[in-house]
Image (spheres, rainbow, N blue to C red):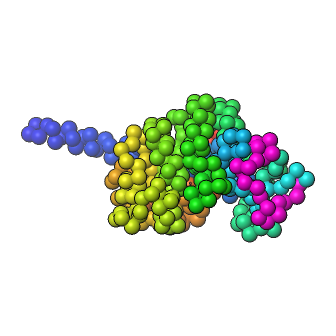
Amino acid sequence: MKYPLLAAALLIAGCAAVLPKAKQHFDLEAHRGGRGLAPENTLAAFSKAIDLGVNTLELDIGLTADGVVVISHDTTLNPDHTRDANGAWLAPQSGATVRSLTLAQIQGYDVGRLNPASNYGKQFALQIPQDGERIPTLAALFDHVRARGAAAATVRFNIETKIDPAKPDETAAPEPMVRALLAEIDKAQMGGRVTVQSFDWRTLALVGQLAPQLPRAYLSSARTLKDSRWTAGLDSTNFTSTPQLVKAASGKSAGPVIWSPAYNDLTPAAIKEAQGLGFKVLPWTVNQRADMLRLMDWGVDGIITDYPDVLRDLMRERGLSLPPPGKAAS
Ligand code: G3P
Ligand code: CA
């Protein structure tokens, strides 16, 4: 044969053409546990997301007065979905800060239902209430996931430190928050399954120093990029793009770096640039099917959504690899 190597190459290519294509990994993240379906940031929501089958549970944390890491998006108790021990909705603007309450005090509140009178509550008509749900500790979530055994053995956690550098009195400072978070991760031996995310990039710099192997996700929005208090002192106007800003902020890191922008800020060029710099791109919070499809076409590495069921269906339609459901379909 004149060109045996070429023939062999063609044979291999021919075989590859008939073999099924390797399924691409795409990160399906349930935002606040999937608040479109269940009360946000509760064990009920995380459990439902595991039943459905997601790659990652997205969640937010704060620190209580007695130093416990709890799962809460808001730095103050939120009247839109919080009732007191008598079952009464908190009055508007009345919520105490998480930081000022002990764990025992916080767990006196019920966060298992949306206040139907609030504009926020009206946004999530499909959410199934679960009265009696409490603001959980991060340790309780880790225990819950471990207790689910094989059903949740591969589920990951994308944990956001909720710190507002413009309101330093409202939360713990970055260092105590990060140290408390890392201690919980360590205690539960969940280091291999956690990403730490934040809009406050000071906390990501600390994670880079204290636990450099952990993946870090740089959250951005038009608002935070305008104010260098959020970007660890970097002035975004000195950079040609947000991926370049993330590169400067993340430095030479051991662990993976993710850029997690508001989805409306993304363009195909920005995705390409970020991925070219070695970052994964993970937009939030994408709830409309058409937006999910567009972002998938543009090549994002995953999507954070309140409706993991919708994204899962789209992933199935596209032949993407699906995270295993925790509960067998009946
Ligand atoms: O993961 C990012 C996303 O959760 C940021 O938005 O306000 O819901 O925490 P927020
Ligand atoms: Ca979040």
Between 306 and 214, the one nearer to me in the picture: 214
Image quarter of the C terminus: top right
Image quarter of the N terminus: top left
Question: Is 15 displayed left or right of 30 in the figure?
Answer: left
* Direction left: furthest residue: 2
Question: Is 91 displayed left or right of 12 in the figure?
Answer: right
Quadrant in which residue 276 is drawn: bottom left
Between 315 and 204, the one nearer to me in the picture: 204
Magenta stretch, overall SS: loop
Looking at the image, residue 49 lies above or below residue 119: above
Residue 56 seen? no
Looking at the image, residue 178 lies above or below residue 163: above
Residue 78 seen? yes
* Direction front: furthest residue: 169
Q: Is residue 180 magenta?
A: no
Q: How many marks?
A: 0
Question: Is 10 displayed left or right of 94 in the figure?
Answer: left
Q: Is residue 100 magenta?
A: yes
Q: Position of residue 100 (x, y in %)?
A: 74, 49
Residue at figure coordinates x 20%, y 38% from the top left: 8
Magenta highlight range? 87-106
Residue at figure coordinates x 45%, y 42% from the top left: 208
Between 308 and 142, the one nearer to me in the picture: 142
Residue at figure coordinates x 32%, y 43% from the top left: 16
Q: Position of residue 209 (x, y in %)?
A: 45, 40
Residue at figure coordinates x 83%, y 46% from the top left: 108
Looking at the image, residue 103 lies above or below residue 143: below
Q: Position of residue 9 (x, y in %)?
A: 21, 41
Q: Position of residue 189 (x, y in %)?
A: 57, 30
Question: Is 30 displayed left or right of 20 in the figure?
Answer: right
